[in-house]
Amino acid sequence: MTQDAIARLLGIMAALRTPGTGCPWDLEQDFASIAPYTLEEAYEVVDAIERGDLGDLRDELGDLLLQVVFHARLAEEGGVFAFADVAEAISDKLIRRHPHVFGDKSAASPEDVAVQWAEIKAQEKKARAERRGIEEPAGLLNGVPPALPALTRAVKLQEKAGRVGFDWADARLVLEKIREETREVEAELGIDGAPHAPAVVEEIGDLLFAVANLARHVGADPEQALRGANAKFERRFGFIERALAEQGKSPKQSTLDEMEALWQAAKAAERE
C-alpha cells in the first residue's frame, strides 16, 4: 500500500509537470522558486507538532513530502537524479551513520551516538571534497549552513566550538555575558535613547547570540522558545483586543496604561 501511495504521488507530480496538459503554475517553477515553500512547509510541520495536532501533522507531512517530490521531479527532468535516488541515498546514509545498529560498532548512550555521527559525517565530507577535486576548508565551523534560521545556526556554531573546549563552563556565566551585552546595547542607545546605527544593530546581534548560547546551556531550543514567546504574546494581546471590544473600543482608541492593565489581567488569568 505504501509503495502504491508513493507511486500515485509521483504520477500526479509528473502529470502536473507535463507540458501542454499540466498545470501552468507548476510548469513554471524551478528549484529556487519553490525553495521558500519548502521552508514554510517544514515550519508548519513543527507548528503541528507543538500544537499536538496529529491530524494536522499528517497533512503537513504530506505537504512537506510534496516538496521533496517536486524537487526530485525537477532533477529528474534535468537528467540529474530521481525520487528513487533520493530515497536510496538517505537509506545508505542512515545505515552508514548507524554502525552500532547495522554494523559491528557499539554506542551505549545518545552521547556516544552523537560523537560517532559527527566523526562519520566528517569522513563523508572529506570524501565528498576529494571526489569533487576541491580542498575542503579546514575551519572547524565550516559546514554550518548559512541558510539556517539565525538562532539555530548560532547554536550549531556554538556547539562546534564547544567540542574543542571553547565554551562557557556554567550557564550562569552566559547569563553574565548577556548582562554585559545588554549594557553595551544601552551604551549605543545613548542618553536620549536614540539608536546609533549600525553599532546598536551589531550589539543587538551580540545580545541575541548570547541568549541563544544560554538556551543551549540549559538544553532549550531558542527557536522553539521564541515561538512559544510569540504564541504567548499573540494570546495575551488577543485578550486585550477582546476586552477592549467589550468596552466598544479598539487598541488605537486606548491608552498604553489601559492596555498594560489588561495585559496584567491576561497574565493573571493564565496563572489561574
Image (tube, rainbow, N blue to C red):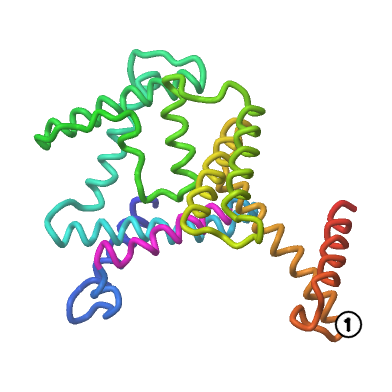
**Outermost residue toward the left?**
133
The kind of residue tagged 1 is Gln
In this rendering, the answer to whether 91 lies above or below 172 is below
Q: Position of residue 187 (x, y in %)?
A: 60, 49
The number of callouts visible is 1
Q: Secondary structure at mark 1?
A: loop
Is residue 52 shown left or right of residue 125? right
Q: What stretch of residues is rendered in magenta?
A: 30-48
The residue lying toward the viewer, choosing from 236 and 69, is 236
In this rendering, the answer to whether 242 lies above or below 195 is below
The residue identified by callout 1 is 247
Classify residue 268 by image quadrant.
bottom right
In this rendering, the answer to whether 224 lies above or below 156 is below
Q: Position of residue 47 (x, y in %)?
A: 57, 56
The residue lying toward the viewer, choosing from 4 and 109, is 109
- Is residue 246 magenta-colored? no
Classify residue 26 by image quadrant.
bottom left
Classify residue 248 by image quadrant.
bottom right
Write the residue at 41% across / 48% down: 148
Write the residue at 55% across / 46% down: 208
Q: Position of residue 60 (x, y in %)?
A: 49, 59
Q: Position of residue 256 (x, y in %)?
A: 80, 71
Write the residue at 34% across / 13% down: 104
